[in-house]
């Protein structure tokens, strides 16, 4: 089975199935994305609105840490390779923002930097396509209110199940979304919490791939399909062992 590792969200699809640069997309049994229409908290970048993530969330901390690493690398490379005259002029600027802007304006990217950027872009495109496929294979995403309605419980109960490891969820700027493949028409698939516990070392996308990717060890069925077909505790234990092997592998 695959080992998906990528860093950015795929393009969303609108209700008619067309690709949209942003938007609330409904596919399969639920939501496949989050609409971004601007307004409070939204920023424009590359012609695309990007909402602020929830302050203090894991996603926000990860973005800030990644940005800091990139800026440190950029500053180090410029300090080593930019002409000393350009650096001297930059230091005469009254602010750090003005200094870095001056250097970036005066120094052309190297061929190595351009090649690295091209490779990153290609990797991102592959990652986007993989996430879109996983989203479709999972039946789409449901938001917390939809899950609460399906299970006949309050939203707080859904949050409690998620925090206890009973539901797989992805944090988005507008809240958590849940792959629809985790649910029957009225409940959570039996044995799901044990399987998620066995795969707890993986990221959301790695875990989702493990749930929906067909496995030769399960006769070509995915772990989710095997759980749906499971008829006894012994069979369920075998599925959990396969889930553990996927994570450790």
Image: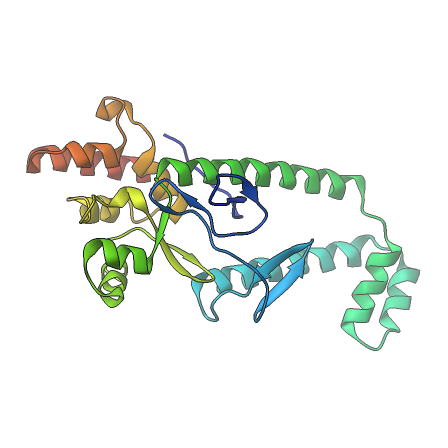
Q: Is residue 215 left or right of residue 20?
A: left
Q: Quarter of the image holding residue 233?
A: top left
Residue drawn at point x = 93 percent, y = 61 percent? 85
Q: Is residue 142 above or below residue 156?
A: above
Residue drawn at point x = 27 percent, y = 63 percent? 159
Residue drawn at point x = 34 percent, y = 40 percent? 139
- Which quadrant is home to the N terminus? top left
Residue drawn at point x = 13 percent, y = 37 percent? 237
**Residue, far bottom:** 94
Q: Is residue 23 above or below residue 231?
A: below
Q: Quarter of the image holding residue 58?
A: bottom left
Observer-nearest of 147 and 17: 17
Q: Is residue 197 left or right of residue 102?
A: left
Residue 140, how many percent across, how many down? Answer: 38, 43
**Residue, far right:** 85
Looking at the rendered structure, the number of numbered marks drawn on it comes to 0
Observer-nearest of 197 and 231: 231
Q: Is residue 91 left or right of residue 47?
A: right
Q: Is residue 203 visible?
A: no
Q: Is residue 224 left or right of residue 1?
A: left
Q: Is residue 79 above or below residue 168?
A: below
Observer-nearest of 31 and 98: 31
Residue 101, how many percent across, how many down? Answer: 81, 64
- Which quadrant is home to the C terminus? top left
Residue 238, how many percent across, how many down? Answer: 15, 33
Q: Is residue 117 visible?
A: yes
Colouring scheme, one of rainbow, by chain, secondary structure, one colour: rainbow
């Amino acid at each position: 089975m695959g080992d998906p590792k990528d860093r950015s969200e795929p393009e969303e699809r609108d209700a008619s199935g067309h690709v949209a640069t942003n938007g609330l997309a409904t596919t399969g049994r639920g939501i496949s994305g989050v609409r971004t229409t601007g307004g409070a908290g939204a920023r424009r970048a590359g012609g695309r609105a990007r909402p602020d993530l929830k302050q203090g969330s894991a996603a926000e901390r990860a973005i800030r840490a990644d940005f800091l690493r990139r800026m440190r690398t950029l500053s180090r490379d410029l300090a080593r390779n930019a002409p000393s005259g350009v650096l001297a002029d930059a230091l005469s600027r009254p602010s750090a923002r003005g200094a870095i802007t001056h250097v970036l304006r005066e120094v052309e990217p190297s061929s190595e930097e351009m090649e690295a950027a091209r490779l990153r872009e290609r990797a991102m495109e592959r990652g986007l396509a993989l996430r879109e496929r996983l989203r479709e294979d999972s039946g789409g995403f449901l938001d917390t209110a939809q899950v609460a309605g399906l299970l006949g419980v309050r939203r707080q109960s859904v949050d409690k199940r998620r925090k206890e490891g009973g539901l797989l969820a992805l944090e988005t700027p507008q809240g958590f979304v849940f792959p629809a493949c985790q649910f029957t028409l009225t409940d959570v698939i039996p044995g799901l919490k044990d399987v998620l516990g066995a795969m707890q070392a993986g990221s959301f996308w790695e875990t989702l791939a493990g749930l929906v990717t067909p496995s030769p060890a399960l006769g070509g069925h995915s772990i989710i399909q095997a759980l749906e077909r499971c008829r006894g505790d012994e069979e369920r234990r075998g599925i959990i062992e396969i889930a553990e092997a996927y994570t450790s592998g």
